[in-house]
Amino acid sequence: MGNCVSLQVQAPCAEVLNHLGSCFCSKLKYIQNLKKNIVALETAMEDLKAVRSDLLRKVHAAEEGGGLQRLHQIKVWLDRVESLESEFNGLYSTRDAELKRLCLSGAGPKNLRLSYLYGKRVFKMLNTVKDLKSKGVFEEVASQAARAVGEERPLTPTVVGQETVLEKAWNHLMDDGTKIMGLYGMGGVGKTTLLTQINNKFVDLCHTHDGIEIVIWVVVSGDLQLHKIQHRIGNKIGYKGVEWKKKKENQKALDIFNFLSKKRFVLLLDDIWRKVDLTEIGIPNPTSQNQWSTNDAWDLFKKKVGQNTLDIHPDIPKIARKVAGACRGLPLALNVIGETMSCKKTTQEWYHAVDVLKTYAADFSDVKEKILPILKYSYDNLEGDSVKSCFLYCSLFPEDALIDKERVIDYWICEGFIDGNESKERAVNQGYEILGTLVCASLLQEGGKYDNKSYVRMHDVVKEMALWIASDLEKHKGSYIVRAGVGLKEVPKVQNWKLVSRMSLVNNKIEEIHESHECPKLTTLLLQNNRCLVSISGEFFRSMPRLVVLDLSWNVDLKVLPEQISELVSLRYLDLSESNIVSLPVGLQKLKRLMHLNLESMLCLEGVSGISNLSSLKTLKLLNFIMWPTLSLLEELERLEHLEVLTVEITSSSVLKQFLCSHRLVRCLQKLSIKYIEEESVRVLTLPSIEDLREVFIGGCGIQEIMIERNTVLTSPCLPHLSKVLIAGCNGLKDLTWLLFAPNLTHLSVWNSSQLEEIISQENAAGVDIVPFRKLEYLHLWDLPELMSIYWSPLPFPYLNLINVQNDCQKLRKLPLDSQSCVAGEELVIEYGDEEWKEKVEWADESTRLRFLPSCKLVLYDV
């Protein structure tokens, strides 16, 4: 809670007491009026929904009858209502418990504080609902749709030989008689790349006077779920919100048909595995050779192998042509095999490659028999069974999904593919080396659009190959059961549970698990993100003696975990994060082999007493954990003698002091969150040197200064691995000079800190010879009314991608940039939320202004 009184020496005592009393009474009203405010909130929410329903009727009439497009302000208002409705549902779901707590508020200050916090949220939401309702009156709801609707898609470098295919496809599309065209071919021939080029050409046509009005790109994927395709198309043409989502498929088809039948549109469907009925989707009915030439294939293969390798021996180019020929013109195979052969330096190795590829790939027409054996050659060339096992394990994730590197490495460690008996850091480093090997072998791809470093993904054809290998080339087809993201409502039927070694049922709609199956070989069970899952019977866990990895995260309706989990005697990895489990079963303490336990964001969990009984625990995650650590919990944590990784959130000054004095716990700390500490005792926060600390969040604290405890030379990096820092709502801070000692910082976000004047203070940094932010990639500055300086002189920023300045940062006139900044990295983008701020920026010189002004981009956030 924020400070509510400011004492003046000369003020009369009575006036001070009155001020204190008024502050207390204003907060007490949140508790006294809770029941009344809840009733008022229910009524106000019903009124708001009624306003939304009336508005949607008008919008649909305009869209379906007049071919108009809803106004952006309508979209924003409806999105806000939807978001608020979701927030209301979450708040209202705990209504009974909170009212019950209200009756017990006299039982202690904790109940009183929680009732106050809940009452405050109810009061604020009531005002928000009323405000949103008052803004729901619009004279116009729709207008003529903009002519150009399309999105240019990122494109990988053009592959050798594809220009000819693109020209042929484009010319065919431009033929007046062509209404529908298909691109056929085996996985990896380059269909998506070709379709991306076609998309971008059509987007260019949108800008011409007689061009296409709408270009729609949809990824269909193997499961071919009609409602998902309709949802993606609906998003592109303006059909959004709860009401449209509730419509049946035939109603959605009619909406799509009515809209597109009045438009000149292009629909591009990628990743089609079977027939798509366009009529069922609602698409109006408008009135193949995929292999490359031998020369094109050879050009690509040469490029991947490298001229140096080809020149080592005069016979290698001739043998290499045979290897390229065995790839049958498939770009994916050419890429993968080319990468593999780039390090083969003897003719014997090349002849061996020809023999292996011809043995598996001779004269068969099936994809499985032509392509998978070819790709398998790169798998066979992986060194060591552990690397191969790690690769096969990646096939457990959903199609096209981003695979979190740290999560999959933890899986690998607990599965035993990587030796985790020694240092956790050493094991993690080995995991990253394996991921790098798989990426270099083109068996995995670097992942996310905005965070390539944290994720990888697996191409769908490579995934098919991995599952084929995992099933022992289909001799034991039931070994890996992967039914991820296919809409299951129950556990699938399995022919022989005794054969199953790994099962992935991620991203489904399973509601109950009550079967009991004998699974003597099952070692991994991935059940995360089944958001309808409400119960798991104890019988389910009775016959899984070898299970080592169990992931139940993001099962938001799961509230109870059966006591029989104690029978998972081999379990090493358990993730319950983001679930609503209320209490941990006592039987959990019997899991003596458990190494990794994730309890982050378990907002209903009532306690973790007895956790010290988990004698093998190495990783414990308690971030965003409602049961904030107490002194007694710290004592339990200190008894975990094998603990190496800890994430924790602290909200008490006494606990914080005790924690930072514990060398044992500090040594394990990787992520630290400090919230809501406003006591005088922590006006100065002194952080010790923490070797493994990766992320820090400090929010809603009265801290006035942050310092680093330095026991060695002045310039030593006290926080060598710290990469992400978020400071929010710390109104006493004047600067963040302590960040000088975090040389590997990549993400810095500072929000809502009203007294912050400098990021790095020149005065406080005197005598410290360190150039900061050499690794910084993202800098976010929001609501900092007193901020005047990031740094007093230009910085090189070799990796900086984004500076984001939003809301009230009007005093920040100078950015630490000159014409030589950011020359080594990607093009810097400077996002801002106020045109006036951009106009008043004082650039170092004219060349700096010319360099970075075109990079400035107005971006408005709904906050």
Image: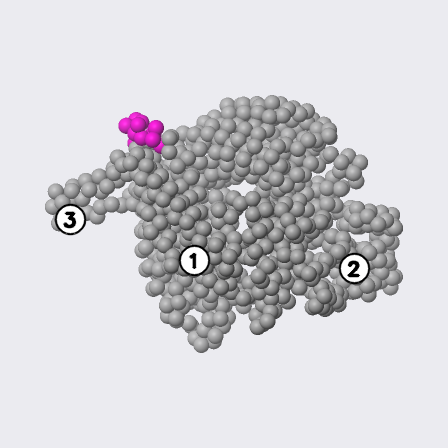
Kindly indicate the quadrant of the structure image that contains residue 806.
bottom left
Q: Which residue is mark 3?
A: 9
Q: Residue at x 50, y 51 (%)?
A: 240
Q: Which residue is mark 2?
A: 288
Specify the principal SS of the magenta part: helix
Query: Which of the marked residues, 1 or 3, is nearer the chain's N terminus?
Result: 3
Nearer the observer: mark 2 or 1; the answer is: 1
Q: What's the residue type where badge 1 is placed?
A: Val
* Residue 40 visible in image: yes
Kindly indicate the quadrant of the structure image that contains residue 832.
bottom left
Q: Residue at x 57, y 70 (%)?
A: 207
Q: What's the residue type where badge 2 is placed?
A: Ser
Residue 590 counted in the magenta span: no
Check whether the beta carbons of the residues at disc 2 and disc 3 lie within 8 A of each other: no
Residue at the far front in the pictured view: 65
x, y (%) of residue 442?
A: 70, 53
Is residue 631 found left or right of 145 in the rendered image?
left
Q: Quadrant of the N terminus?
A: top left
Q: Which numbered marker is on residue 141?
A: 1
Is residue 808 found left or right of 70 in the rendered image?
left
x, y (%) of residue 404?
A: 59, 46
Q: CA separation, marks 2 and 1?
A: 47 Å
Q: Is residue 725 above or below residue 627?
A: below
Kindly indicate the quadrant of the structure image that contains residue 209.
bottom right
Where are the magenta residues, as a range? Answer: 98-109
Q: Which numbered marker is on residue 234?
A: none
Which sits in the foreground, 193 or 343? Answer: 193
Q: CA separation, marks 1 and 3?
A: 58 Å
Nearer the observer: mark 2 or 3; the answer is: 2
Query: Which of the marked residues, 2 or 3, is nearer the chain's N terminus?
Result: 3
* Residue 598 visible in image: no
Other residues around mark 2 within 10 Å, as few (<14) / some (14–19) / many (≥20): few
